Image (cartoon, helix red, strand yellow):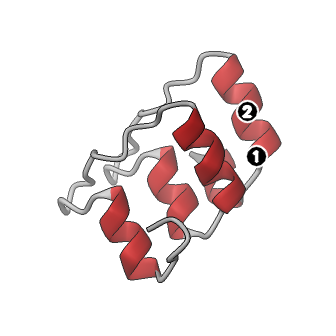
Amino acid sequence: MDAAWRGCAACTEVLLEAGAGIDSIDPAGFTALMWAESNGRFEVVDRLIAARASIDLADKRELTTLMHAAWSGHTRTV
């Protein structure tokens, strides 16, 4: 989650290769993909999607990754 939030694509890659849960959910219900796209970390978003991160999960407020991207104004991830 932290690597995605900070935009560290290399860290994200290492964690994925080590078997990190790609669709793990934090206490707020966010996935790494949600954190990456909410913060405009496009390189991390691309890597997570390539690694088959789910785009259909919703956080505790029932907002999906697409909704987060739209709300954040990141048309590239929309």
* Quadrant of res 57: top left
* Amino acid type for the residue under numbered disc 2: Glu
Q: Are marks 2 and 1 in contact (CB under 8 Å)?
A: yes
Find residue 13 and name its label.
2
* Quadrant of res 67: bottom left
Residue at image point 27% right, 54% down: 59
Residue at image point 33% right, 54% down: 28
Residue 4, given in percent of the width and then of the height, sits at 63, 50
What residue is shown with label 1? 9
Q: In this view, which residue lies farthest toward the right?
A: 10
- 1 to the left or right of 71: right
Residue 46, given in percent of the width and then of the height, sits at 62, 49
* Amino acid type for the residue under numbered disc 1: Ala
Residue 49, given in percent of the width and then of the height, sits at 53, 42
Q: In this view, which residue lies farthest toward the left?
A: 62
Q: Which quarter of the figure is the C terminus placed in?
A: bottom left
Separation of disc 2 and disc 1 at Cα?
6 Å
Residue 16, given in percent of the width and then of the height, sits at 64, 26
Q: Residues within 10 Å of mark 1 (few under 14, many from 20)?
A: many
* Quadrant of res 25: top left
